Amino acid sequence: MSTVLITGASRGIGAQCALRFAREGCDVAINYHHSEESAMALVKEIEALGVRVCALQADVADSMQVRKMFDTVRAQLGAVDVLVNNAGIAHVGLLTDMTDHEWRRLIDTDLSGAFYCCREALLDMIRAHSGVIVNIASMWGEAGASCEAAYSAAKAGVIGLTKALAKEVGPSGVRVNAVSPGVVMTDMMASFSEEDVAALKDETPLMQLGAPEDIADAVLFLASEKARFITGQVLSVNGGMVI
Ligand code: NAP
């Protein structure tokens, strides 16, 4: 039985990953930042599946809060066997309009947050000579998006982190991979108009947008024994939008 920690699991893709792992019989630690109510509702849903679950409030952009979060998981569920770095924010706008604060907040959340969590998780994983990390990147980290330069840079950083860390900790028995989603209908897409969403659909070879379940299935696969020989890879789940 594995213990899985998923960051940003109160909503969207993270919440779906938490459910998916719980259905496989894993104990699940749900990290959230602001959405306490939805995190608690998810805890109830997961408890009903008969596995152990805890919800942890922490800002992944703050290394001290991340450290405390891992200490709490260790005390409540044991060491983390599978880490899913999913917490993220987006920012749409011209680079020339972006403030220092907005830039730092995005990089701190989407890239440094993954670093802080990997650092904590690896303390236990390297000792155990086993463990899996799955980082949630984005197709914009692969291809770059106009008006999403900071987000694209952060997600490209996540891909670089994934590849480098896979080489560093492979000999210690730890696998590190990324899932790179395309357009997935979650709150993150709320600022897009109906026309924008329809245009994105038209641009996608499979002519449809993704659901959180599509991403959760890919995460589960990479975390599973079926992926035991896969490390340092980016699995793009994007309907063919970036190839
Ligand atoms: P979402 O519905 O907006 O949910 C974001 C989650 O991240 C929430 O649970 C939120 O927690 C959490 N979060 C944000 N900042 C945090 C922080 N500082 N500390 C801890 N948790 C934090 O987004 P989503 O679409 O599910 O996205 C999940 C991941 O997939 C992100 O990394 C995103 O970049 C990536 N992605 C999404 C898409 C897409 O089209 N949706 C495409 C490519 C990649 P609270 O609500 O509790 O604050």
Image (spheres, rainbow, N blue to C red):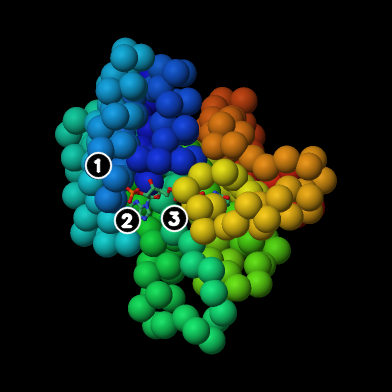
Q: Secondary structure at mark 2?
A: loop
Label 3, residues with CA under 10 Å away: few <14, some 14-19, many ≥20: many
Residue 60 numbered mark, or none? 2
* Inter-mark Cα distance, 2 to 3: 9 Å
Residue 186 numbered mark, or none? none
Q: Is mark 3 within 8 Å of ligand 1?
A: yes
Label 2 near label 1: C-beta < 8 Å?
Answer: no
Q: Which residue position holds label 1?
A: 36
Q: Quadrant of the N terminus?
A: top left
* Inter-mark Cα distance, 3 to 1: 16 Å
Q: Is residue 26 left or right of residue 215?
A: left
Q: Provide residue 91's location: percent of width, then percent of height.
A: 49, 67
Q: Secondary structure at mark 3?
A: loop
* Inter-mark Cα distance, 1 to 2: 15 Å
Q: Which residue position holds label 3?
A: 88
Q: Is mark 1 within 8 Å of ligand 1?
A: yes
Residue drawn 60% across the image and 73% down it: 147
Residue drawn 36% across the image and 78% down it: 101
Residue drawn 28% across the image and 56% down it: 59
* Residue 55 or residue 228, whichever sits in front: 55
Q: Secondary structure at mark 1?
A: helix
